[in-house]
Image (spheres, rainbow, N blue to C red):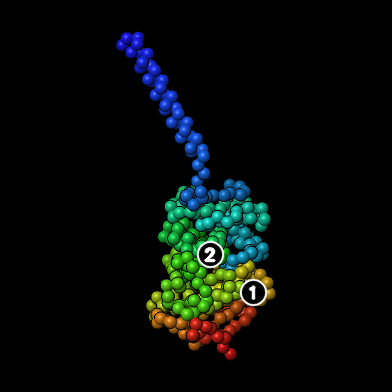
Amino acid sequence: MCKKERRIAEAGERGLRVYVREIVTGLAVMLSAMPATPAAARALDVHLEGDPAGPAPARVSGGLLLIGGGDHSADAMRWFIAKAGHGHIVILRASQHGEASTEFVREIGGVLSAETFVTHARSASRDKHLLEALRKADGVFIAGGDQARYLRRWRGTPIAEALDAHVRAGKPLAGTSAGLAILGEYVYGAMDGQSLTSAQGLAEPYGKGTTIETGFLHLDLLKGVIPDSHFTQRGRLGRLFAFLAKAQASRPASAPPLIGIGIDEGVALAVEPDGTGRVYPAAPGTGVSIAFGAGIRRSKVPGPLVAARVQVKVAGPQSVVHLPSGEVDNPLSRQDYSAGGGTITPLP
């Protein structure tokens, strides 16, 4: 190649390098200007407070803490933390609302660590770090939010298996609001994106809006149980009757009746491994309502709920609740109701 040809070739190479450099620089500027990946686009968010290393300083023992939503009872939370041996807590969520890890470590106190996992996709249920944390957890707390997300993202996954294994291993499990709703053998899933009212449930208990689900967790103490939260504050007794009607209609005639457990806001039911539970109330008169499905016939007839007599017992701080039977020693009150025409009526 002559000198002139070499100069032309070298000039072309320099031009190509400049061109490529300009493209790379332009792409870098574009990428830097793009917003950060939103949480919804990630499968999992994690937040840790405290030191996750080391054994629990006290003995870990089993139990269920069933919370009706709203503010947490300080005494009930201390019961749960003591059950977890003051060790390591895992908090599960499917939406981000504050940092529960910070609350456990800095506000409630008495734990070595608290780690929150927020699952944004079903694929997060296979995350190795999450599953290892669940395996090692001394206590697991399922936060409030949307129970439909929990069911869609966790049912039939390693997360559900890990929760069952956690309870079988004699470790405590807690749930509040939506986290309470998913603990029963039967679950109001709110799968249509709506929150059923008592009026709607009583008017059409077997309709599509009464989305009763099962097959998520398998907890012996909540076998045959449908939980509900924010109970008295949101007038949910009628819809609990509807839940019982819809769930029982799908069971064999020989199956025992179900019970519904409605827990008021701020109230917690702390259940020991032997099934005895005590109520931590939020205020005088608040408590845990037990509705017995024996008074609700097994039917799928369209139209309003019809029931001659449904027994409801309310447990207060001096009561003892026995699960899974639902029997209550020293109830705060006892009342029977009839249902018909889309309403419920107290009976003498």
Q: Is residue 155 above or below residue 114?
A: below
The answer to which image quadrant residue 275 occupies is bottom right
Give me the disc on residue 232.
Answer: none
Amino acid residing under circle 2? Ala
Amino acid residing under circle 1? Thr
> 251 or 264: which is nearer to us?
264
Whether residue 336 sits left or right of residue 189 in the image: it is: right
Which quarter of the rendered picture does the C terminus lie within? bottom right
Judge whether residue 238 can be spotted in this image.
Answer: yes
Residue at which label 2 appears: 178
Give the x, y percent position of residue 71: 64, 64
Give the x, y percent position of residue 170: 53, 61
Which quarter of the rendered picture does the N terminus lie within? top left
> 246 or 58: which is nearer to us?
246
Residue at which label 1 appears: 286
Q: Is residue 31 above or below residue 257?
A: above
